[in-house]
Image (cartoon, rainbow, N blue to C red):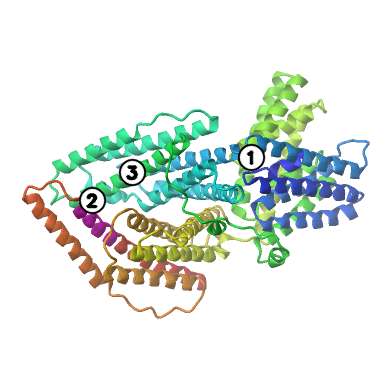
Amino acid sequence: MGCLLSSPSDVTGTLKHKTLGIFFAALLGAFSYIIARYAAVNLAMIIPMLLVMMFGIAFLSVFGFRASLVSFSGLLAVVLSFAGVGSELEIWEKGLYIFSGGIWYMMASTIWYLIRPQRATEQLLAETIEITAEYLRLRVRLLGQDSPKEDFQEELLQLQTELNEHHESLREILLSSRKTSGNSGYARKRLLIFIDLVDMLELAMANPIDYEKFKISFKDDNDILNHFALFTLNLAAHLDKIALAIHKNNSLPANNIEKEIDELGKILENYRNKIDMTQKRDAMLMLRHLYDYQVRQAQKILNIDRMLKNIEVNRKPAFKEKEIQKFITPNEYSFKTLSNNFNLDSVIFRHALRLAIIVVIGYLIGAYFSVQNSYWILLTVIVIMRPNYGLTKQRIRKRIVGTLIGGAVAIGIVVLTQNTTLYAIFGILSLTLAFSLIQKNYTTAAVFITLSIVFIYALMQPEVLKVIQFRVFDTLIGATLAAIGNFILWPKWEKQTIDGVIAASIKANRNYLEEIIQYYHKKGNLLPGYKLSRKKAFLEIGNLSGAFQRMAQEPKSKQQNLGLIYEIVGLNQTFMSAMASLGTYIRTHPTTKASSEFNTYSRGILNNLKQAYNLLENKEAENAVSENTGEASETLHKRFDKLAKERDLEIKSGKREIDRDMRFKLQEAHLITGQLEWMLDISNKLSKNIQKLKNSQDE
């Protein structure tokens, strides 16, 4: 039981955090079990004990994700204290055994880590590479002529959020290990791989597929897009092979990426030679941007491939030791954090109070109706209940489906055989699979949890079918209580906090844009502020996407302005893509000096973002200076037209091969003008939609 209670805290992280997490889970589990067992004398003592302990333990989740796992161990210990497993031992002795089991698990986990210290990093790295491959693959589908962008937007946002979470975990492991163990060859190369993976996400976001524009420009040349789509699919396939090799610790696959880049370049060249450039310059520039993007992604994958093959790489991570800490998200374990959250405004406070009351109600129902194994009701409640309605609803659905499937499978096995040896084997295998899958696929994990419980009980009780019946019945009661509790007891609907989440995303985008503008003016080495602002913008758009998805799962009556908020989320996402596109181009291409027209547009965009932020924060609108972007736009377009005419004259004179300098000037004039106009338009729409949102909320 000590191993069982400690194991949830054994998640990806540094050795220090893993060890401390397991230790405190064992300690909390042992103390919680002892207190709960000593209090289980009569109803008058059990009820206040459940109220105080469930609230207090659940409230520890304010300290973050790992603390929530330690908290779950304490909650589980209280619930399992009602299981009534027979023993001649005193309660305090059982508590010591539980603590000893936790320490044993901690030692086993630490020894395993020391034997294979790099394995956890490698697994997380492989998972990140797999998700990156899936992200690239999904984007390719946007190039299809019959693939509307809206069909994939939600899935793309989910993958972006998942990637951000993996990047955050990798960042903590790699930067913390670099800080404690120095700049070893292994650590340096893994950090460089991580940087390339983050850059790949930024590159992808910086190059959104304008489906309608591509559809119009290449309606008669669909084959050319198929070549580009196939190239990206091949890149994604190679990433999958790399991830599989890391997972299995096998040799890396051979790659033909450089050969494929050459072939794609020839296809682009052939297309350029067969078209009339004066008529299809925009289409050619779009295709050239796409080619440049794909080549840069391919180069990132080649870098990853070389580093994993231990080919000498001269790059060094551009981090100074004093800057490393800025990139790691800290958790503040202090009394101040507890006191700041000890009020009904705190989501965790509400959740802890709600959980305590529902657990007490579940216990009373079990006691009143003399439900066999009534603690299964409590177990279902603590596993299913989450701080918000959307996640709880999701868990309820997955738990019920998993329990019903597990029950049906268990019935089938029981009908076919009554062999207790097979029950023991199935019970152990099911429990192992349940723990392996609980973080990745909760429905499947619930199937195996049900199977393991049924078969373990089948070893002690001959009436297996009754065990299955009670398991399903108790799960339904617990799920119903969890749903009712989240709906009526101090619910925190997303509409109450969505303004703050949108504001945080807009603020992060504004800071990121300011860093891009500053870099365009000064160039030189990329400062840490740029990367920090980029990280913050990525994380905040992920938070916004998650908040919207939770809102979409809430009851219809609570989904205030859902359509308008969806539009705001989409605009925020599109704005960040346009901004990342601008920043990536400036960083990776030679550019001219930032013009006064660029500054005019930049001020206009920043003013729009500031107005939107002030509206959400209920601050007084500032009298922003109106920027004459119309005149700036005319000047920028004239500049591009002048370059285009120069190039047309070169073509007419027989010079079909464009000079590198001329190509970069045309690309810069085309892309930067387009991105500035696009960002100004998006920021205008964003400000107007937020004004609509505030007006609707005031009505």
Q: CA distance from mark 3 to mark 2?
A: 14 Å
Checking the image for residue 113, the label placed there is: none
Is tag 2's residue or tag 1's residue first in the polypeptide sequence? Answer: 2
The answer to which image quadrant residue 648 occupies is: bottom left
Which residue is tagged 3? 294
Distance, label 3 to label 1, CA atoms, is 36 Å
**Rendered location of residue 174, percent (x, y):** 56, 47
Query: Quick check: 459 left or right of 450?
Result: right
User: Relative to residue 344, is residue 645 depicted above or below?
Assistant: above
The amino acid type of the residue labelled 2 equals: Leu
- Give the residue type at disc 1: Ile
Which residue is pictured at 29% across the width and 60% down the height?
A: 672
First in residue order: circle 3 vs circle 1: 3
Please tell me which residue lies in front, 76 or 454.
Answer: 76
Is there a contact, CB below 8 Å, between mark 3 and mark 2?
Answer: no
Mark 2 crowdedness (10 Å alpha carbons): few <14, some 14-19, many ≥20: some
**Sequence-first disc among 3 and 2:** 2
208 falls in the magenta region: no
- Name the residue located 26 percent from the left edge and 58 percent from the top edge: 668
Q: Nearer the viewer, residue 57 or 362?
A: 57
To which residue does mark 1 refer?
438
Residue 107's quadrant in the figure?
Answer: top right
Would you say the residues marked 3 and 1 are in contact, meaning their CB atoms lie under 8 Å apart?
A: no
